[in-house]
Image (cartoon, rainbow, N blue to C red):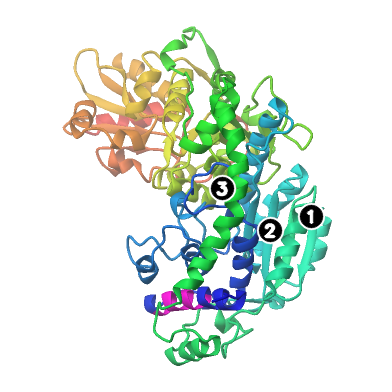
């Protein structure tokens, strides 16, 4: 039987509707309205192979409108990916391969976790940026290379474009001229609370033309041929593209074209009416197997020719001795990145005294020459955060292999873009002031969900920055970072611990936050980069008798050591524990914790920030010394005194706490 597009599209639609009906929740409107877009993309344009989901040169597809997950799973099932009919029947169940919003699973054809609107767009920009980086390296070796030359496609809706992160990311993409980024906009003029025009009246075409995007419009969102033609035209552009496809949300239902169609369950009666209209089997999850065979075979036949042509160059590159080509293959195929970095190899003069951010810059530039796959940038703050990779220029359209990225004042997009780059195999970092970490939070959350090797470098870590005032003086940000599951946070005490934090970052594929001081930091006696991986360790052992313990981080380690020496002259013998990473310490054997922090001994914590999480380590809530109010604008010493964090105030607080026993 000859399979027509309408039959295949309606089969995919109704599988999605059956999934939502069985789960009792989901978003039927996008399934009924946008499936022709996805079908045209997969059947005619997207270079992916279900039997080779790890193919390093596959095109990337990101469903930024993650609420359309039922549509995506249904399409992937029909395309031959390893999402079975039983998986579809378990839509939104615990441990299902078909969760409520797409979750990163490369083997199933899902390139990234999406759901928070706008994030998928920023992530896709990062993927396109990584593609250009890899492609440029390959073409510098062989101008005719096609080892890496894939496209990144995004399907988005109004909600995505209304989120600020999307504009940040797309503005950046245009500046970088990422011509292999193609945005497909499902324009149905409706969102959850009503018509789009009630909250957004801008001219989308005009907006993207102003961004210098290549703009295409498909007036009939059911016309597969027109959608495919627009995609083909977009691939000819030397700028990123957007294809605006006019669709009808909830098409063919009584809710068509209304906001009710977005998430309202369709009645069983209406589902049966749809199936009758589409001439499909009436029972749930039943379809003509020939339809699936047609879709799977069509994609395989179209793409396999391209794969075979590509394979010859791949085999030649694999057998070559070119370390860059072999490195790219290892990254994209096996996620392998070897960086020869050992903190024990860096001997620092004991008289060393420098700002934490400058020490960090030196550590980063120990790493950078060892691999060209380590790169990143800042949110227009590289001169302040000191995160420039020396001997490398700024990344741009004209210098695509530059390793310093000017993200602009776009913290949120920066983090989302870094996610896309990390998903593409690169070891990346981004930097800004600690007080602005909140701007990155939603994207950092996704870094942590996917356990991506993104390193966030946060500087200006306390009220000691003084004159910039409370808006720039972090208080609650460390607590926020530490509260994110899978995020490992470091607040190093000196250059030894900074190097140790980077060693951990290099050797572990997980999200890391490194929090640094703008203040000068001397090398503290007994700090050791090799001990950082334990999260906490002793930097001053009691000399005669253990009277108490001060647990400190960052600059406060030096303050704690100074206090301990002063109080020793007054008869108090204190142990000082540096805790560069609370998360790593909590992963240690309880025996190690008891040895380091015996419960029968008074334990005080000292950190220039919120005390909220420190009750876990202090003897009780009265033994946490921190800052739980906003700061103040003034000279450094005056600001510290204002919040009670100058040396004399801290000395008195510590002394009083021990004398109150």
**Which residue is more in the foreground, 489 or 81?**
81
Q: CA distance from mark 2 to mark 3?
A: 23 Å
Q: Main secondary structure of the magenta part?
A: helix
Comparing labels 3 and 1, the label whose residue is closer to the camera? 1
* Residue 130 colored in magenta in the image: no
Label drawn at residue 469: none
Q: Position of residue 328 (x, y in %)?
A: 56, 31
Q: Is residue 640 visible?
A: no
Q: Position of residue 447 (x, y in %)?
A: 49, 46
Residue named by callout 1: 213
Q: Earlier in the sequence, mark 1 or mark 2?
A: 2
Residue named by callout 3: 440
**Which residue is more in the foreground, 638 or 430?**
430
Q: CA distance from mark 1 to mark 2?
A: 10 Å
Question: Where are the magenta residues, as a range?
Answer: 13-21
Q: Secondary structure at mark 2?
A: strand
Residue named by callout 2: 183
**Which residue is more in the foreground, 472 or 285?**
285
Q: Is residue 601 visible?
A: yes
Q: Which class describes the residues within 10 Å of circle 3: few (<14), some (14-19), or many (20+)?
A: some
Q: CA distance from mark 3 to mark 1?
A: 25 Å
Q: Which class describes the residues within 10 Å of circle 2: few (<14), some (14-19), or many (20+)?
A: many
Most distant residue in the front direction:
1
The answer to whether 541 appears left or right of 32 in the picture is: left
């Amino acid at each position: 039987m000859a399979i027509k597009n309408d039959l295949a599209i309606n089969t995919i639609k109704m599988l999605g509707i059956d999934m939502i009906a069985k789960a009792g929740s989901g978003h039927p409107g996008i399934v009924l309205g946008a499936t022709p877009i996805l079908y045209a993309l997969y059947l005619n344009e997207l270079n992916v192979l279900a039997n080779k989901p790890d193919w390093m040169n596959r095109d990337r597809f990101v469903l930024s409108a993650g609420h359309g997950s039922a549509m995506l799973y249904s399409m992937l099932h029909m395309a031959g990916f390893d999402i079975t009919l039983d998986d579809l029947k378990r839509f939104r169940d615990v441990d299902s391969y078909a969760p409520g919003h797409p979750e990163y699973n490369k083997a199933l054809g899902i390139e990234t976790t999406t759901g928070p609107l706008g994030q998928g767009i920023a992530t896709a920009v990062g993927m396109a940026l990584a593609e250009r980086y890899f492609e440029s390296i390959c073409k510098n070796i062989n101008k005719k290379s096609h080892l890496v030359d894939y496209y990144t496609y995004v399907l988005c809706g109004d909600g995505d474009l209304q989120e600020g992160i999307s504009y940040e990311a797309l503005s950046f993409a245009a500046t970088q001229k990422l011509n292999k980024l193609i945005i497909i906009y499902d324009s149905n003029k409706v969102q959850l609370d009503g018509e789009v025009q009630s909250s957004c009246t801008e001219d989308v075409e005009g907006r993207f033309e102003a961004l210098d995007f290549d703009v295409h419009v498909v007036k009939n969102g059911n016309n597969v041929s027109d959608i495919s033609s627009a995609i083909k035209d977009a691939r000819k552009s030397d700028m990123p593209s957007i294809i605006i496809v006019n669709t009808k949300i909830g098409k063919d239902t009584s809710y068509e074209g209304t906001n009710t169609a977005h998430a309202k369950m369709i009645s069983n009666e209406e589902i049966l009416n749809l199936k009758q209209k589409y001439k499909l089997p009436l029972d749930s999850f039943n379809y003509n197997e020939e339809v699936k065979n047609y879709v799977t075979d069509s994609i395989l036949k179209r793409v396999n020719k391209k794969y075979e042509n590509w394979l010859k160059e791949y085999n030649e590159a694999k057998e070559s001795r070119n370390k860059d080509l072999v490195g790219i293959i290892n990254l994209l195929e096996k996620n392998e990145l070897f960086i020869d970095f050992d903190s024990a190899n860096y001997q620092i003069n004991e008289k060393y005294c420098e700002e934490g951010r400058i020490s960090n810059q030196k550590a980063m530039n120990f790493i950078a020459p060892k691999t060209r796959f380590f790169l990143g940038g800042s949110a227009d703050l590289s001169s302040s955060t000191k995160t420039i990779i020396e001997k490398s220029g700024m990344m741009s359209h004209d210098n695509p292999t530059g390793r310093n990225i000017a993200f602009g004042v776009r913290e949120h997009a920066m983090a989302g873009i870094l996610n896309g780059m990390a998903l593409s195999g690169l070891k990346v970092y981004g930097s800004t002031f600690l007080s602005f970490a909140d701007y990155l939070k939603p994207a950092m959350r996704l870094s942590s969900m996917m356990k991506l090797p993104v390193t966030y470098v946060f500087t200006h870590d306390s009220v000691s920055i003084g004159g910039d005032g409370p808006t720039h003086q972090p208080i609650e940000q460390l607590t926020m970072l530490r509260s994110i599951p899978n995020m490992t946070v470091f607040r190093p005490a000196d250059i030894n611990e900074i190097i140790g934090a980077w060693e951990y970052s290099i050797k572990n594929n997980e999200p890391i936050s490194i929090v640094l001081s703008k203040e000068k930091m001397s090398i503290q006696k007994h700090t050791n980069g090799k001990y950082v991986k334990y999260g906490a360790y002793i930097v001053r052992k009691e000399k005669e008798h253990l009277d108490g313990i001060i647990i400190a981080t960052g600059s406060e380690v030096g303050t704690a050591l100074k206090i301990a020496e002063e109080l020793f002259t007054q008869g108090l013998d204190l142990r000082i524990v540096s805790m560069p990473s609370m998360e790593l310490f909590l992963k240690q054997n309880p025996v190690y914790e008891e040895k380091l922090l015996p419960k029968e001994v008074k334990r005080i914590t000292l950190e220039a920030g919120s005390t909220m999480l420190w009750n876990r380590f202090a003897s009780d809530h009265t033994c946490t010394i921190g800052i739980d109010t906003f700061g103040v604008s003034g000279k450094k010493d005056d600001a510290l005194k204002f919040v009670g964090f100058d040396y004399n105030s801290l000395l008195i607080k510590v002394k009083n706490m021990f004398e109150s026993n």
